[in-house]
């Protein structure tokens, strides 16, 4: 059971291991730039948010953003590349594994990449900046990273399965993924939203992901409502990814 | 006949287009079977159905007794597939490509390592096993794809146009390799190279527009057109004029032109005399009676060249 998924995940991890340094360097550049630009550049203008220093306010979100972006990128591009360019999906499909093995292997590859890159950025932010947290809060925070990476890996898998033109994957990222992430209050408190919009923003799974992660890491609060939202979203996106891939393969 | 592959009324529609129409066929075990036809004839569609990559619109196919519809996983356990395009993983070395394939087939390192050593030696890539396939030549990549398909000792090997795009030397090497597998497994290959089918296959089916046109050994198929009177004529020049002249002759059954050369099929033996009378005095470089080839079989059946 899932021997195929494990083999495909193992292949992806082998490839990641070969290029881990360049991958980490590339993935760290963006959140660290944002941290320096907002956390350091705006520090003098924004003293604190709800009693928390601004660099500390944005750090958990930046780490989560790295993880979910990496999960989405890996799943979407890897699925598209293996399906349309390298056609290795076709090679997998003539072996005695199921399409579920393939899609689950790919989802877990995206999830693993997200988790690894998120942790790497966390370590760098921890050592290079004054951002500190209590280690006992880390376990709560990891739950958000895990669920967030899983959700975005499933979304990436769906995009990589359905989209044939690579530029359209970039468009989905620009029009759907980035707004979903930035609207979730990484750089500002949710209280900044007008009251009429706030319920919609709070219903977004990305809000659960980023706001929940911040509450976990900064205050040590395990927000059950956010976790429930994320578990349900992860289950739905996982089922959707599997069904979408299965349908595409039987076309 | 001990049957390895059995197609039962396979039809595949893509919307309004019928790629394969009610196709039935039995392939004998441990034989080399060739499906010959031009691009778009339906060969790849049939291979995709047989390798469980695609479901037929109607009908069923059995591979070693297992249905591609109801026992697809069992079918995939027994087959090796060499697709039309090399689908090697360029981020894995040659050896890692083989290891991944073995793992997907549930082989243990104890099983696959000696087998990989043996195959790499056989295809002449043992010294390049740690290289990535994107730096290999087309012929080397093809050999690696064939080795990958053979790794788990399949009972049926599917080769979809195995030598398309290869230089003549690499093509010969792949042919020799396929020949060496004769009697070890059933080989089902598609090709649009007549020479390939002629030299490799025990049995050939020529198909076009989703239907089988003729079935037999290369010798039988050529014998079927032996009654044809096919002449090859090469003119010294002015070929356009001679093409018009040849086309105007009522006893010319078919005409194929290649620069200044013409392949002329006459309707009957008795047509030779009036034919010669018509072309007497023409600038003929050479003229000879042509031995029938599979190309002639195809032209006779479809009225067109296989590469059209």
Image: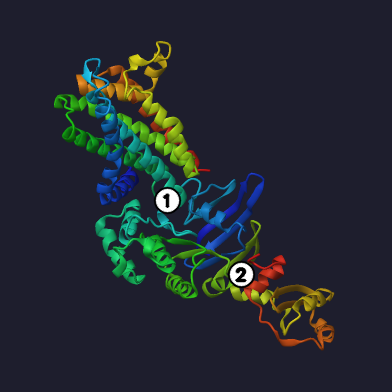
Expressed as whole percent of the image width and height from the top left, the position of residue A71 reads 34, 37
Q: Residues within 10 Å of mark 1 (few under 14, many from 20)?
A: some
Numbered circles on residues, count: 2
The picture quadrant where one finds residue A36 is top left
For marks 2 and 1, give the CA distance: 30 Å
Q: Secondary structure at mark 2?
A: strand
Identify which residue is drawn at 51% across, 46% down. B69
Q: Secondary structure at mark 1?
A: helix
The picture quadrant where one finds residue B27 is bottom right
Q: Check whether the beta carbons of the residues at disc 2 and disc 1 lie within 8 A of each other.
A: no
* Front residue (pair B298, A131): A131
Numbered circle sitting on residue A195: none
* Front residue (pair B46, B82): B82
- Please tell me which of labels 2 and 1 falls first in the chain: 1
Q: Which residue is mark 1?
A: B74
Residue farthest to the left? A135
Numbered circle sitting on residue B216: 2
Identify whether A111 is placed above or below A86: above
Identify whether B273 is placed above or below A249: below
Expressed as whole percent of the image width and height from the top left, the position of residue B272 reads 80, 84
Identify which residue is drawn at 32% across, 53% down. B103
Expressed as whole percent of the image width and height from the top left, the position of residue B224 reads 68, 74
Expressed as whole percent of the image width and height from the top left, the position of residue B191 reads 55, 65
Residues indicated by labels 2 and 1 sit on the same polypeptide chain: yes
Left/right of residue B126 with respect to residue B3 in the rendered view: left
């Amino acid at each position: 059971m899932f021997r195929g998924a494990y083999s495909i995940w193992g292949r992806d991890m082998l490839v990641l291991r070969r290029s881990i340094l360049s991958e980490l360097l590339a993935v760290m550049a963006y959140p660290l730039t944002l941290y320096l630009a907002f956390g350091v550049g705006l520090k003098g203008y924004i003293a604190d948010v709800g009693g928390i220093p601004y660099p500390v306010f944005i750090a958990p979100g930046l780490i989560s953003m790295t993880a979910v972006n990496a999960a989405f990128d890996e799943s979407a591009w890897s699925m598209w590349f293996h399906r349309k360019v390298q056609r290795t999906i076709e090679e997998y499909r003539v072996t005695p594994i199921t399409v579920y093995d393939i899609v689950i292997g790919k989802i877990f590859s995206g999830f693993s990449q997200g988790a690894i890159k998120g942790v790497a950025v966390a370590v760098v932010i921890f050592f290079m900046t004054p951002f500190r947290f209590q280690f006992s809060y880390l376990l709560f925070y990891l739950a958000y990273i895990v669920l967030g990476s899983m959700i975005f890996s499933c979304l990436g898998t769906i995009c990589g399965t359905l989209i044939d033109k690579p530029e359209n994957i970039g468009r989905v990222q620009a029009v759907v993924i980035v707004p979903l992430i930035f609207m979730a209050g990484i750089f500002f408190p949710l209280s900044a939203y007008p009251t009429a919009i706030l319920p919609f923003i709070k219903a977004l799974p990305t809000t659960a992901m980023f706001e929940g992660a911040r509450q976990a890491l900064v205050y040590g609060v395990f927000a059950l409502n956010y976790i429930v939202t994320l578990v349900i979203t992860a289950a739905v996106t996982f089922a959707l990814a599997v069904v979408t891939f299965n349908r595409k393969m039987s076309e | 006949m001990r049957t390895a592959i059995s197609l039962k009324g396979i039809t595949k529609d893509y919307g309004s287009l019928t790629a394969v129409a009610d196709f039935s066929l039995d392939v004998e075990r441990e034989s080399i079977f060739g499906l010959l036809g031009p691009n778009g004839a339906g060969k790849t569609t049939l291979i995709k159905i047989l390798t469980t990559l695609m479901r037929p619109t109607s009908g069923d196919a059995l591979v070693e007794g297992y249905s591609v519809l109801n026992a697809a996983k069992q079918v995939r356990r027994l087959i090796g597939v060499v697709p039309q395009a090399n689908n090697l993983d360029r981020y894995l070395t040659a050896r890692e490509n083989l290891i991944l394939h073995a793992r997907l087939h549930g082989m243990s390192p104890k099983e696959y390592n000696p087998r990989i050593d043996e195959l790499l030696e056989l295809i002449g890539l043992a010294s390049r096993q740690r290289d990535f396939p994107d730096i290999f030549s087309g012929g080397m990549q093809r050999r690696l794809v064939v080795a990958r398909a053979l790794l788990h000792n399949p009972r049926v090997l599917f080769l979809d146009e195995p030598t398309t795009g290869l230089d003549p030397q690499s093509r010969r090497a792949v042919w020799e390799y396929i020949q060496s597998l004769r009697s070890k497994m059933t080989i089902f290959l598609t090709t649009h190279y007549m020479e390939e089918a002629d030299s490799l296959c025990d049995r050939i089916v020529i198909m076009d527009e989703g239907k089988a046109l003729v079935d037999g050994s290369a010798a039988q198929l050529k014998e079927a057109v032996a009654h044809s009177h096919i002449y090859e004529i090469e003119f010294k020049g002015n070929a356009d004029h001679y093409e018009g002249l040849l086309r105007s002759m009522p006893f010319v059954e078919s005409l194929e032109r290649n620069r200044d050369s013409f392949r002329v099929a006459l309707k009957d033996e008795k047509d030779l005399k009036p034919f010669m009378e018509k072309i007497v005095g023409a600038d003929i470089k050479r003229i000879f009676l042509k031995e029938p080839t599979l190309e002639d079989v195809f032209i006779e059946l479809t009225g067109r060249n296989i590469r059209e």
